[in-house]
Image (cartoon, coloured by chain):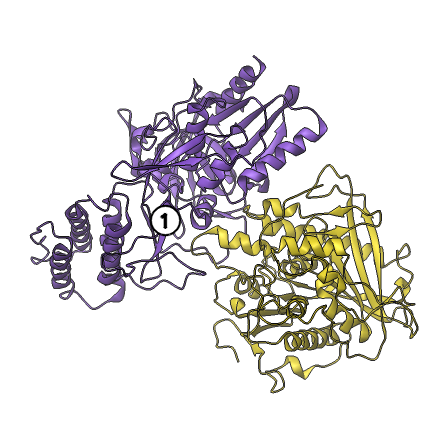
């Protein structure tokens, strides 16, 4: 199936930008159409995870026959590719690959990145051992679902995923098929970005968020319970599940929490939100973490709107120096390719902050350990502001 | 080109208007001195600030530097329109003053502006120093100067707000479409009685149980037509825009039962069926005829149509195409050209002409693959701007047949946006549009090859006589 790729599309954000002249314009995606800035260092090497556990990674092919594909209704099932990162037994093995050469090519072409070899992203060096034996006690590992930004594959959240796995979390990164430039199935078929065809339609972001919620529920079904599809599934603590996402993946986290009570806590990293929280509110813990475009009363009304309906533990963190992609691997990858990334934070620093705050949130809400980092601004991370609508960010 | 108020209120249209970048036929014009009075907006708009007389001045000189008729335009007419609106606004607020008198004008654009500004400031200096009041007066003045161009693609966008509880895909209003659209404001001559509902989208109209075909006999006590002439203010009340929130009272006649009733609809946010919001929708009709509805020439619209047709053709051989452009408020002329290029190569689809008569042709993109399908295009009064570019080219170049009713007649020329000092956007064309046979479509519209209007009875019964006619034509 061949679908022309689009220029940078930060999911529903594009829809927002299009919604009216006065609509909040999106924080923009980086990897697109930027000019070479510095000498490329070659292939990116993701920063080593900081936790005590070796990290394993494996991929799962999951097929949901209960629904047709929402983007290609002729396909009578929803097929998903999931990468699991997990604490592993120490051992030998090959490193997990970042993405295939074909996926790299389609992603770079989709983002209109030129001047680098098309297989460049496939050469990024990861820290996980491919298919390593999972380690842990039965029911002892909390589970975190990660959902990437629109047009981006699950691998763009690898640096965060490896960190969490090294700290004892099972992490499930989901490719929401046809919502990114390339997902490869085990039989070699490559699904391209069919959703890109309609990303300027009113209601597009709402649809994507809903699809992601359905995808996540299905993935949870497949990872937990008696018929679980992964050899390490028995290690998962099915009562301690959270979801985090970047951009529309973050919108998907809100949607998934509303749809599925198994998702106990959620994180939205710089994503305009779409799911309707009922007037009665959502009382499970939620973290907004955004760039300057997501300050309270900023161009995007969605966090202000949802904040009032979040009735449980909540935080609204803003990194004024961050870019929309600062919460992903994209700055790390772009740096290695010699592509300029907007924002004041170095790629290493933005990843350190993302890892630190996401982990603190998960330790607080899935492991129930106090985290003073989340209570007030920290001198160690002066880039991070604590915001409350109607007040100045601290 | 971007339709002006033809489809105002439709979110889609705003999207198209704000994101489409029409091909420029000339570089951004500058003043004689070389300095730009106004430039194209870049990046995200900053928050709006109150409009001032300095912003009005900027708009005035921006028009004189860049507008289609800039060389020959009588600038005095714009100033008179502006001053008239200024005095109306004063009077409306009970603040009329003896100094509010139009100064003498000479025909010298700069000297006349100076005289105008002096008179304006004489009056406003006697009013309270209230930014809201002063801003409102300046806004009324600016609005009238732009309206004074009499150009359906000249528009000043300001003060557009979104409800704070807005979700992506939401619409604001009464939740209905009627046989006379919001364009009645600028083009009342096209409205025909009776006024009836053609679509119930959701929200208050749905809750009140209204249905297509219901005849609207009065709006807030006013008849929509008096002696066959439309009452624009009455009909416009059907299309409130946020933050307008006054309830609207309708007398409704359901023809098949003869029952009359009164409903009161309170404007608000509602969630239309997402399927109705898609820019491109498709279905396979009988005998291999593809049906594609395109609601606007949004970015990528042409390729989306081509991909949709190719998907429909994957399962069976297609024999014809019905392209439904009813209610298509326009968008990017580039998309109209690209879509036309699927039906003809080596053709001129339109001309962009300067006021002195010099025209640049817009040509098909012959790298686009020809579809080779018999074509019928459905049109109505809601087909405006780029939609008329498309349908006039189909007709003039004999690429297919048009079925339905005459198009809007809102295609003066591609609007270019300019940023003003109060962070609002002024847009107007620097050239005017002619169809391939060099005829004017603006104000006139494109006449269908087969005139098939929709009656209230059709709407009530869910019939689509234009589509039926299209299928007949494709079967011949």
Q: Nearer the viewer, residue A10 or A224?
A: A10
The colour applied to the residues of chain B in this rendering is purple
- Chain identity for the colour yellow used in the image: A
Furthest-bottom residue in this view: A379
Secondary structure under tag 1 reads strand
Image vertical order of residue A313 relative to residue A108, above or below? below
Q: Nearer the viewer, residue A240 or A192?
A: A192
B172 horizontally vs A214: left or right: left
* Image location of residue B285, percent across then percent down: 63, 24
A273 horizontally vs B90: left or right: right
Quadrant of the image for the N terminus of chain A? top right
Q: Nearer the viewer, residue B442 or B97?
A: B442
B465 horizontally vs B185: left or right: right
Q: Residue at the spot x=31%, y=62% of the render?
A: B421
Q: Residue at the spot x=72%, y=28% of the render?
A: B315
**Pointer 1 residue:** B416
Identify the image quadrant of residue B118. bottom left
């Amino acid at each position: 199936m061949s679908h022309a790729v689009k220029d940078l599309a930060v999911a529903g954000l594009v829809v927002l930008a299009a919604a009216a002249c006065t609509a909040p314009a999106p924080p923009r995606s980086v990897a697109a159409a930027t000019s070479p800035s510095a000498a490329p260092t070659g292939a990116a090497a993701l920063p080593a995870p900081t936790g005590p556990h070796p990290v394993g990674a494996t991929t799962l092919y999951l097929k949901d026959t209960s629904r047709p594909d929402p983007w290609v209704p002729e396909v009578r099932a929803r097929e998903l590719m999931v990468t699991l990162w997990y604490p592993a037994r120490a051992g030998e093995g090959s490193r997990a690959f970042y993405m295939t050469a074909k996926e790299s090519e389609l992603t770079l072409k989709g983002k209109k990145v030129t001047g680098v070899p098309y297989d460049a992203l496939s050469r990024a060096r990861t820290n996980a051992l491919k298919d390593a034996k999972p380690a842990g006690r039965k029911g002892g590992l909390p589970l975190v679902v990660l959902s990437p930004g629109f047009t981006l594959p699950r691998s763009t959240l690898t640096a965060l995923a490896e960190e969490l796995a090294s700290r004892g979390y099972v992490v499930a990164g989901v490719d929401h098929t046809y919502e990114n430039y390339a997902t490869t199935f085990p039989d070699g078929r490559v699904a391209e970005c069919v959703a890109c065809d309609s990303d300027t339609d009113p209601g597009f972001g709402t649809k994507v968020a809903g699809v992601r919620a359905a995808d996540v529920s299905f993935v949870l079904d497949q990872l937990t319970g008696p018929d679980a599809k992964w050899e390490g599934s028995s290690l998962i603590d099915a009562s301690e599940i959270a979801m985090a996402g970047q951009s529309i993946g973050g919108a998907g986290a809100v949607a998934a929490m509303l749809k599925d009570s198994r998702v106990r806590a959620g994180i939205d990293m710089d994503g305009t939100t779409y799911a309707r929280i009922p007037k009665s509110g959502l009382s499970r813990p939620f973290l907004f973490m955004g760039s300057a475009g997501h300050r309270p009363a900023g161009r995007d009304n969605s966090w202000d709107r949802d904040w009032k309906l979040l009735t449980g533990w909540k935080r609204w963190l803003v990194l004024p120096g961050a870019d929309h992609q600062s919460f992903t691997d994209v700055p790390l990858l772009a740096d290695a390719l010699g592509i300029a990334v907007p924002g004041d934070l170095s790629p290493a620093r933005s990843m350190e902050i993302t890892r630190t705050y996401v982990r603190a949130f998960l330790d607080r809400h899935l492991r129930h350990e106090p985290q003073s980092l989340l209570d007030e601004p920290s001198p160690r991370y002066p880039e991070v502001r604590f915001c409350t609508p109607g007040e100045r960010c601290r | 080109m971007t339709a002006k108020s033809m489809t105002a209120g439709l979110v889609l249209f705003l999207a198209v208007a704000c994101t489409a970048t029409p091909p420029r036929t000339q570089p951004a014009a500058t003043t004689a001195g070389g300095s730009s009075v106004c430039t194209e907006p870049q990046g995200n708009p900053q928050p709006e600030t109150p409009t001032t007389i300095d912003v009005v001045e900027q708009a005035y000189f921006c028009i004189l530097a860049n507008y289609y008729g800039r060389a020959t335009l009588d600038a005095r007419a714009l100033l008179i329109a502006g001053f008239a609106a200024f005095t109306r606004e004063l009077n409306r607020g009970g603040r009329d003053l003896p100094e509010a008198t139009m100064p003498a004008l000479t025909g010298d654009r700069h000297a006349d502006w100076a005289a105008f500004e002096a008179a304006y400031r004489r009056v406003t200096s006697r009013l309270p120093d209230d930014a809201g009041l002063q801003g409102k007066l300046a806004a009324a003045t600016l609005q009238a100067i732009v309206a004074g161009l009499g150009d359906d693609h000249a528009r000043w966008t300001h003060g557009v707000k979104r409800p704070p509880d807005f979700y992506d895909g939401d619409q604001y209003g009464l939740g209905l479409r009627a046989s006379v659209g919001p364009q009645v404001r600028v083009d009342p001559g096209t409205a025909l009685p009776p006024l009836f509902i053609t679509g119930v989208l959701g929200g208050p109209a749905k809750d009140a149980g209204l249905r297509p075909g219901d005849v609207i006999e009065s709006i807030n006590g006013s008849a929509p037509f008096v002696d066959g002439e439309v009452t624009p203010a009455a009909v416009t009340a059907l299309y409130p825009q946020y933050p307008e929130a006054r309830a609207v009272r309708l007398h409704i006649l359901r023809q098949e039962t003869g029952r009359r009733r009164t409903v009161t609809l309170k404007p608000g946010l509602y969630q239309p069926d997402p399927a109705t919001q898609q820019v491109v929708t498709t279905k396979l009709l009988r005998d291999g005829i593809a049906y594609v509805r395109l609601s606007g020439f949004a970015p990528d619209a042409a390729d989306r149509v081509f991909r949709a047709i190719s998907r429909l053709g994957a399962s069976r051989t297609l024999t014809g195409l019905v392209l439904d452009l009813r209610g298509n408020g326009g968008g990017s002329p580039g998309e109209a050209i690209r879509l036309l290029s699927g039906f003809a190569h080596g053709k001129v689809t339109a001309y962009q002409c300067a006021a002195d008569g010099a025209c640049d042709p817009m040509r098909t993109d012959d790298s686009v693959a020809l579809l080779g399908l018999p074509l019928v295009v459905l049109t109505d009064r809601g087909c405006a701007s780029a939609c008329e570019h498309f349908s006039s080219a189909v007709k003039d170049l004999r690429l297919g047949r048009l079925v339905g009713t005459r198009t809007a007649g809102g295609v003066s020329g591609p609007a270019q946006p300019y940023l003003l000092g109060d962070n609002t956007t002024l847009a107007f064309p620097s050239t005017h549009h002619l169809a391939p046979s060099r005829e004017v479509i603006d104000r006139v519209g494109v006449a269908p090859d087969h005139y098939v209007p929709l009656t209230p009875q059709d709407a009530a019964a869910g019939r689509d006589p234009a589509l039926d006619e299209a299928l007949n034509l494709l079967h011949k």
